[in-house]
Structure formats: structure tokens, C-alpha cells
Image: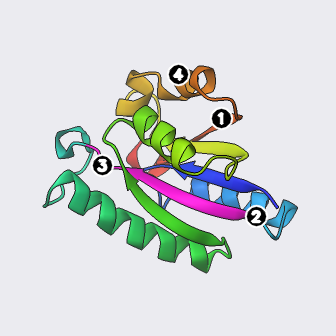
Amino acid sequence: MVGYLVVAHQTADSAELAARLAQAARDDPAALFTLLIPATDPAHLLVWEAGSANEIASRKAEHAQAVLRKHGINVHRTVVGDSSPLQAIDDEIGANPGAHARVILCTLPLGISHWLGLDVPDEAGRAFDIPVEHVTAGSTYR
């Protein structure tokens, strides 16, 4: 069994992420997925949403969990994390040592992704002792 830490916000319910996680679930039917939604400042979201960063992230986590479960993905836990994706990942890994064998980080495409502008995938790859995989989603925004 492999534990995956899935980090996304606006792309958490995307077809691209669901396809990648479905493949992981087919490779290991016992895989467990933790969905981590950083509480991103609403000013950094591509589409405006009402509410505080934590409220928006909580709604996104609930909705994405339901969407991913419909795809047969065993999302056993959702977490709303720090506004910084790197800090949110660090907090989750620190709180649950050994629970995650891989991080799957999902962003919008280059040019519109705030996280790519901050180089989050490469920074995460350097910062953590587990593999970090980047998935690009949001083809509907192009």
C-alpha cells in the first residue's frame, strides 16, 4: 500500500488529476490518498469565490473528495493547510511521518498558475525526502 499526498486547489477536481490518481489506484488498489488543499489567498485564485481562504479551501476539499471518489479513488482524508503550499506539505508530512510515499502536486498551466510562478514543484522536490510529481491540469482555462 502506498500513501499519496495530493496537493491541489483550483485543480483538485480536474479531469487530469483524477486520471493520474485513477492510474495510481489501478497500480495499487490499496493506495490511500490524502487530499491537501492549501488555504490560498482568494486574490490568487483564477476565478473569484466568496468567503475566506479557509472557507473556500474547505468547500473545494469537500467537492473534490466527492468527485475523486466517483472515479474510484480512495480519498481517506482531506486537509486544509497553510496558504503556502510548501508549508502545507511540510506540516502534513511532519504531522504524519511515514504516511506518504509520494507527493502529487497539481497546478494550472504555466502562465496562469500562481504556484508555478513561485516554482513550487521544483522547490518541493528539493525540500522533501519523498518523490514529488507535478500534474498540469486546467485545460478548460486555456
Query: What secondary structure prevails in the magenta region?
Result: strand
Q: CA distance from mark 4 to mark 3?
A: 19 Å
Q: Which mark is residue 39?
A: 3
Residue behind mark 2: 31
Q: Secondary structure at mark 2?
A: loop
Q: Is residue 127 above or below residue 30?
A: above
Q: CA distance from mark 1 to mark 2?
A: 16 Å
Q: Disc 4 or 3, which lies upstream in sequence?
A: 3
- Residue 30 x/y as whole percent: 80, 69
Q: Residues within 10 Å of mark 3 (few under 14, many from 20)?
A: many
Q: CA distance from mark 2 to mark 4?
A: 25 Å
Q: Disc 2 or 4, which lies upstream in sequence?
A: 2
Tag 2–tag 4 contact (CB < 8 Å): no
Q: Secondary structure at mark 1?
A: strand
Q: Which mark is residue 30?
A: none
Amino acid carrying label 1: it is: Val
Amino acid carrying label 2: it is: Ala
Residue stretch in magenta: 32-40
